[in-house]
Image: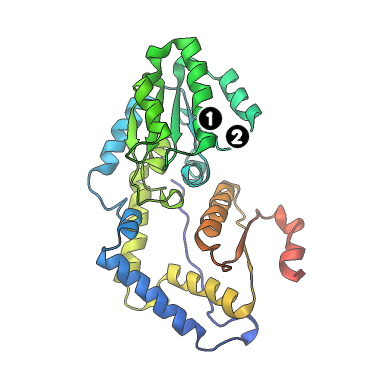
Amino acid sequence: MTRVPYSQEFHLSPPGGGGDAAAPGSLMEKAGSVLRDIKKAKDPKLNAVFGQFLKPGKPDQLVKEAGRIAGKTKQLIVFGTGGSSLGAQTLLSLAPAGGAVKITFIDNLAPEITEAALKTMDPAATHFLVISKSGYTMEVIAQSLIALENMSRILGEGALREHFTFITQPGDNPLRSIAKEWSIPVLDHDPDLTGRFSVFSSVGLLPALVGGVDTRQTLAGARAVLDQALAEEALDSIPAVKGALFSASAERYGNCFIHVMMPYVNSLQMLTKWFVQLWAESLGKKGRGTTPVAALGPLDQHSQLQMFLDGR
């Protein structure tokens, strides 16, 4: 198992010593308010995010689904984009190599990628996992229709339900209509859970389970981080709060508008791509936020570091 320790010392004063000296205090108050809202468990959207790994039994249900898929499969092809793909890719990038099932993520609509996957796969030993929270993601619908037509021509329409699984929210939507037409199994996605926070739901855990990731360890780690944050009385002792305060203070009072993540381990490269999506979609609102940049050391140390340290 790969362990990724999170231990860093942050200094909350704005860069250069300028800015509003009271700024970190006001940001700390906001951080405390968010943690209190999580504890109260009254906000459905917060509950959707933090309740994913607190609901007993859900991981066991996903283990059964993963067993159903992996039992007859040598390759799992995942259609999803953004938050419906990057979280699972990150979990699998940190897992030991050599799983029994090959996992292929097709998260862009470039036709040559989909065509290559369909040409090289073994249809009888391939399963497609199609993910769209809304059920209206046109890129994912297009990919699924191409794959359905291809598999139907090779294996027959009656075999489709054995080779496809959809994940989407309850209610009428195009993806559910397709599933109903071909009797394809559908896993419900919580309507209050946005894609970028879905890694601890079936969206992230199901591909990870099929790929051999120990998701119980993943969930236990997430639970430990949350428990520590909710139990700690001193907000400035919580790493996540300290990191958030540093970033917000640097932007608002230090004129720092670019946030670079540059690990020096290749297995963390997918984490940087997921970070960019999480950061940009969550914080790029109403003229605020910092621009996330993914880099990898030492490669980008010798190509971009000059700009990071001494550029604008």
Q: Residue at x 22, y 47 (%)?
A: 56
Task: First in sequence, mark 2 or 1: give its number.
Answer: 2
Q: Element type at marker 2?
A: loop
Q: Nearer the viewer, residue 40 or 297?
A: 40
| Residue 72 in view, yes or no | no
Q: Element type at marker 1?
A: helix
Q: Nearer the viewer, residue 36 or 190?
A: 190
Whether residue 207 is situated above or below residue 21 in the rendered picture: above
Residue 142 is marked as 1
Q: Nearer the viewer, residue 187 or 75?
A: 187
The amino acid marked with disc number 1 is: Ala
Where residue 293 appears, as percent x and y from the top left, is: 64, 58
Where residue 106 appears, as percent x and y from the top left, is: 55, 34
Whether residue 121 is situated above or below residue 107 in the rendered picture: above
Q: Residue at x 42, y 22 (%)?
A: 73
Whether residue 249 is situated above or below residue 126 in the rendered picture: below
Where residue 114 appears, as percent x and y from the top left, is: 59, 27
Q: Residue furthest front?
A: 172
Give the distance between the C-alpha atoms of the residues marked 2 and 1, in whole angstroms: 8 Å
Q: Residue furthest left?
A: 56
Q: Is residue 169 left or right of residue 284?
A: left
Label 1 crowd bin: few (<14), some (14–19), many (20+), radius 10 Å: few
Residue 109 is marked as 2
